[in-house]
Amino acid sequence: MALIFRRIDHDQALRAATIIVQAYIEPPWNEEWSIDKATDRICELSTTPSRIGVAGGSAHLVGLSSGAALALEAAAAGLGIGKVAAYEPPYVGRDSRAGAAYEGQLKKLIAEGRRGAAVKYFMRDMVGVPPIFVVLMQLMFGVWKKLKAVAHTLPYDAAVMGDFTVPVSRLGTIRTPTLVMHGSKTDARLKKAAQAVAEAVPSAQHLALAGQTHNVSPEVLTRALLDFFRG
């Protein structure tokens, strides 16, 4: 998930909503989209002065999980971002398999209508969630139903994350003030990933949110973001 924070008035909010609607009703945001076309479209929207920030100037960017990786990539691309905050980018580096292989298998499972299998593949084989937790999540009917409902978006995550290793060279080009966070009770691999990202980004701040896991409390996260953005 990636979010842009900026104080805007009603008219500006309406303009922003119009831009979002226009972006999603046009190709490639349909069943025939491709990663290359989607990337081109994102770059087009992001680099058009009338669209980024809407109100003019720069915007603060926040990303969670794979959205954190996307936010960092935007900062590395030199877009007009005031500050960027990344919460637990999942650079867990499972093995050396290419991201394209992950993405291809996900697309295959989804094309076959095996949405549950796609979710399991993403969690177990790509991210490395212990099998017992994957089984337990399937028993949480409401949660599992929601995960299957958005299974078609998993190739986006695969495209953003690549081979799930920290892109040290690209992150080293970031000149935007950056905050990298993780929860104190989160998976050890995610803590290690956050530390590696903070070390790769020049002058990045690193913060552990007490008592938090990958499913961070919005209230706790908001307090940390406000402190960072106002600082």
Image (spheres, grey):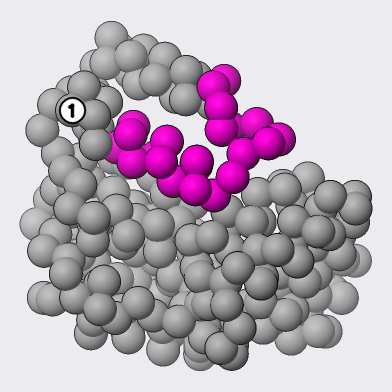
Q: Residue sitting at 65 percent across and 49 percent down?
A: 153
- Of 58 and 51, nearer the camera is 51
- Of 63 and 77, nearer the camera is 77
Can you say which quadrant of the picture contains the C terminus?
Answer: bottom left
Q: Mark 1 = which residue?
A: 49
Q: Is residue 190 magenta?
A: no
Q: Position of residue 70 (x, y in %)?
A: 40, 57
Q: Which residues are magenta?
A: 25-46
Disc 1, SS: loop
Task: Give the residue furthest to the top.
Answer: 11
Q: Residues within 10 Å of mark 1 (few under 14, many from 20)?
A: some
Q: Position of residue 20 (x, y in %)?
A: 44, 24
* Number of numbered tags placed on the structure image: 1
Q: Position of residue 205 (x, y in %)?
A: 19, 74
Q: Residue sitting at 28 percent across and 49 percent down?
A: 61
Q: Is residue 31 magenta?
A: yes
Above or below, comparing residue 92 to residue 122 in the picture: below
Q: Is residue 230 visible?
A: yes
Quarter of the image where one finds residue 59 = top left
Q: Which amino acid type is shown beneath numbered disc 1?
A: Pro
Q: Residue sitting at 24 percent across and 67 percent down?
A: 179
Q: Is residue 212 visible?
A: no
Q: Position of residue 37 (x, y in %)?
A: 50, 41
In the visual, does 231 lie left or right of 118?
Answer: left
